[in-house]
Image (tube, coloured by chain):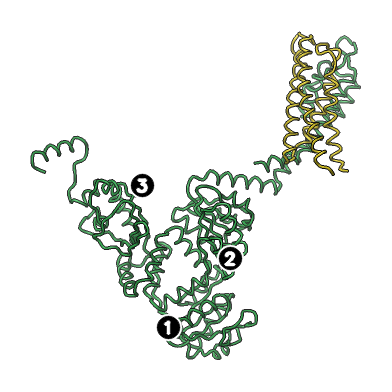
Chain colours: A yellow, B green
């Protein structure tokens, strides 16, 4: 067993699970989507992205790409949140919440691909 | 490119992870610790504010406590966050700086720059593998003729030397193993403008590997190899290496030319000499009497074989005949540096001496001992290291054999003036008298300097006026071309050595030879003569003047006027 692989797999799966946790619930109800959960998703995704750095294989490249997509979506969501709450008087209206959650939904899709790739790689390895 | 980014990413993984974790913990802590607003009510920092605060604290900018002054509990946490984040930053920046100074990283960057430079090459170039003495001579000779070269060598010191050498053209150099295809490829093996690969390392196997790689990756490429053994030569020839140069065989061939036709040898050494150096004196190796060959190595064997073919008796002196082998008639055992071995080999009756061991000190010692025993000897000295040139000049051998120079010279002629190479081969079929006459003509042209060599193709790029005139069906012969445009009664100080039309080659074509478009001319002579000739070749009025002796009207008005007057009957 390679401890590096354990950590790697852990963070990739954790990124997906946390993302899912944030995503579930009424899409426009701010009570169903907690800011700390988004924070956790962002941090874990960031860690997962950095972990994927420097892998020269084709699989490594695609994994890094999915992570970058997820980061893009999540940072978008965080920016929308911050802008709505702090920079303008709009607040967490259903519209804003819906757009935040849908952005995180996109990130989740990227995370799903990431996990699927990880599983495929593991299955192909047969060792 | 890939290498560098991957190297950075891989090395920066740990510091970046540390940064992410430290920031995340610090931000999380700040949002969880209760603070007090202006009215004294309990309030929590939002993630946005916490991120903002940590960002300027971690980078030690410090704008103050926002949005409200902190409570002591918050300040305790900030102390932890501040030190942790600053240390994380120092760690990250330190790693980055260490990475930049790292040798692997710098090599990767240099290699990338080199590959980029090669990809951007817009002029034909030769790829020279091995930058030893031979490589240095060759690159100098090529760049002085305006050719471009790219160098690979596995010795970093030699590669760095290129910057100090003050070559006329910039020569990109890669420190790398030429045996690895990836390095050859980076050096432009597959570049469309790569004219040829020259393998000059002092290792036969490496040269062989380079030749194979070059032929496999770029079939049409000219491959020129140095080879010191007949096995390797045969191996190289088997997959189509274009030119294989064995310095010892080459020298032995020179020697037999000098024996049979001294003028031809002189002609060869003049024409192939380094431009603007002093002309060499003729040498007359003795054909009567016997020779002593000290050292039965690769050079000794090659010379021994040639001398035997010429019917000249040669006595071999060899210290370790067990290792080198010995000629069938046996040999004198010894180094040749002592008087008694030389006496045993019959130095008193000998006419020629070859100091051909692979040790310069021994060779010098052999020559000095032999000269003491017998003053009038024809001496051939083998110089192994370029640094010893001064000593060999001082000892004054009649013929010098320097591997590096010999190979460099041959390849230079082959690459820089391919027609000269053909001419030299063509000259072998002529008599010695023919060569003697040519030698005296050349010496009259250039006095005591090596003549310049010039190749001209009669086409639109190199001889615009001539090719236009020929296309109009006008008659131009060599005599017109050779006339001095500034003084038409005189001829230029140059000789047409060869005219090539397709595969048809004529050495020393007659003056009334008509030119045709596509002809290639090889000339030798005074360098200034070629400058003047380019007027005749490219300037229509100069050509017309030389051809007809009449300076035609310039400009549209004057031409019209001339045509009108011509119609009137007067010219």
Q: Quadrant of residue A110?
A: top right
Numbered label attached to residue B235: 2
Q: Chain of mark 2?
A: B
Q: Which residue is mark 1?
A: B286
Q: Chain of mark 1?
A: B
Left or right: residue B352 versus residue A111 is left
Image quarter where the C terminus of chain A lies is top right
Q: Is residue A103 above or below residue B8?
A: above
The residue mark sitting in front, 1 or 3, is 3
Q: Is residue B323 above or below residue B411?
A: below
Q: Position of residue B525 (x, y in %)?
A: 33, 61
Left or right: residue B114 versus residue A81 is left
Q: Position of residue A93 (x, y in %)?
A: 79, 9
Mark closer to the chain start, 2 or 1: 2
Mark closer to the chain start, 1 or 3: 1
Mark 2 → mark 1, Cα distance in angstroms: 36 Å
Labels 3 and 2 touching (C-beta < 8 A): no
Q: Position of residue B103 (x, y in %)?
A: 70, 49
Q: Is residue A101 above or below residue A64?
A: above
Numbered label attached to residue B245: none
For mark 3, give the secondary structure.
Answer: loop
The residue lying at 30 percent from left, 71 percent from top is B437
Q: Nearer the viewer, residue B207 or B368?
A: B207
Numbered label attached to residue B461: 3
């Amino acid at each position: 067993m390679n401890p590096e692989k354990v950590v790697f797999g852990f963070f990739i799966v954790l990124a997906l699970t946390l993302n899912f946790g944030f995503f579930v619930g009424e899409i426009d109800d701010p009570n169903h989507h907690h800011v700390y959960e988004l924070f956790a998703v962002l941090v874990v995704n960031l860690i997962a992205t950095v972990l994927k750095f420097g892998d020269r294989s084709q699989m490594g490249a695609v994994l890094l790409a999915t992570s970058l997509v997820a980061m893009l979506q999540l940072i978008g969501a965080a920016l929308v949140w911050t802008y709505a709450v702090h920079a303008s008087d709009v607040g967490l209206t259903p519209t804003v919440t819906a757009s935040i959650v849908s952005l995180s939904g996109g990130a989740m899709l990227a995370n799903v691909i990431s996990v699927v790739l990880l599983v495929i790689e593991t299955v192909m390895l047969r060792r | 490119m890939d290498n560098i980014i991957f190297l950075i990413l891989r090395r920066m993984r740990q510091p970046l992870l540390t940064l992410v974790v430290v920031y995340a913990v610090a931000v999380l802590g700040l949002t969880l610790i209760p603070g007090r607003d202006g009215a004294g009510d309990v309030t929590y920092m939002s993630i946005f504010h916490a991120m903002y605060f940590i960002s300027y604290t971690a980078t030690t900018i410090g704008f103050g406590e926002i949005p409200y002054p902190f409570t002591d509990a918050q300040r305790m946490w900030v102390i932890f966050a501040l030190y942790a984040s600053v240390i994380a930053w120092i760690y990250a920046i330190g790693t980055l700086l260490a990475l930049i100074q790292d040798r692997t990283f710098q090599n990767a960057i240099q290699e990338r720059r080199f590959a980029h430079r090669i990809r951007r090459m817009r002029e034909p170039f030769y790829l020279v593998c091995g930058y030893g003495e031979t490589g240095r001579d060759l690159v100098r000779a090529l760049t002085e003729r305006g050719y471009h070269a790219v160098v690979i060598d596995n010795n970093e010191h030699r590669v760095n030397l290129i910057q100090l050498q003050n070559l006329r053209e910039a020569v990109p150099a890669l420190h790398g193993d030429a045996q690895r295809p990836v390095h050859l490829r980076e050096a432009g093996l597959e570049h469309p403008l790569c004219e040829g690969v020259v393998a000059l390392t002092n290792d036969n196997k490496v040269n062989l590997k380079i030749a194979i790689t070059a032929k496999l990756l770029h079939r049409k490429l000219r491959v020129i190899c140095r080879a010191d053994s007949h096995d390797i030569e045969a191996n190289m020839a088997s997959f189509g290496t274009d030119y294989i140069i064995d310095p010892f065989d080459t020298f032995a061939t020179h020697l037999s030319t000098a024996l049979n036709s001294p003028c031809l040898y002189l002609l060869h050494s003049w024409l192939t000499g380094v431009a603007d150096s002093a002309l060499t004196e003729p040498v007359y190796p003795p054909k009567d009497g016997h020779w002593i060959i000290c050292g039965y190595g690769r050079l000794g064997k090659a010379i021994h074989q040639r001398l035997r073919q010429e019917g000249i008796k040669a006595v071999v002196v060899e210290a370790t005949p067990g290792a080198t082998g010995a000629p069938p008639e046996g040999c004198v055992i010894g180094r040749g540096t002592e008087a008694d071995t030389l006496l045993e080999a019959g130095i008193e009756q000998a006419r020629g001496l070859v100091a051909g061991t692979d040790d310069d000190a021994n060779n010098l010692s052999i020559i000095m001992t032999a000269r003491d025993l017998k003053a009038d000897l024809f001496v051939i000295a083998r110089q192994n290291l370029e640094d010893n040139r001064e000593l060999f000049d001082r000892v004054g051998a009649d013929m010098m054999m320097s591997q590096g120079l010999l190979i460099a010279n041959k390849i230079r002629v082959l690459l820089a003036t391919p027609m000269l190479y053909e001419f030299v081969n063509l000259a072998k079929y002529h008599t010695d008298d023919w060569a003697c006459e040519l030698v005296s003509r050349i010496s009259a042209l250039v006095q005591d300097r090596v003549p310049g060599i010039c190749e001209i193709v009669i086409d639109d790029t190199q001889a615009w006026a001539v090719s236009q005139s020929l296309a109009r069906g006008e008659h131009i012969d060599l005599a017109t071309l050779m006339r001095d445009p500034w003084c038409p009664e005189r001829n230029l100080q140059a000789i047409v050595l060869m005219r090539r039309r397709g595969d048809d080659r004529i050495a020393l074509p007659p003056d009334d030879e008509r030119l045709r478009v596509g002809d290639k001319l090889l000339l030798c002579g005074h360098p200034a003569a070629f400058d003047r000739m380019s007027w005749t070749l490219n300037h229509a009025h100069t050509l017309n003047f030389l051809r007809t002796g009449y300076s035609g009207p310039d400009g549209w008005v004057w031409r019209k006027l001339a045509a009108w007057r011509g119609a009137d009957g007067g010219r």
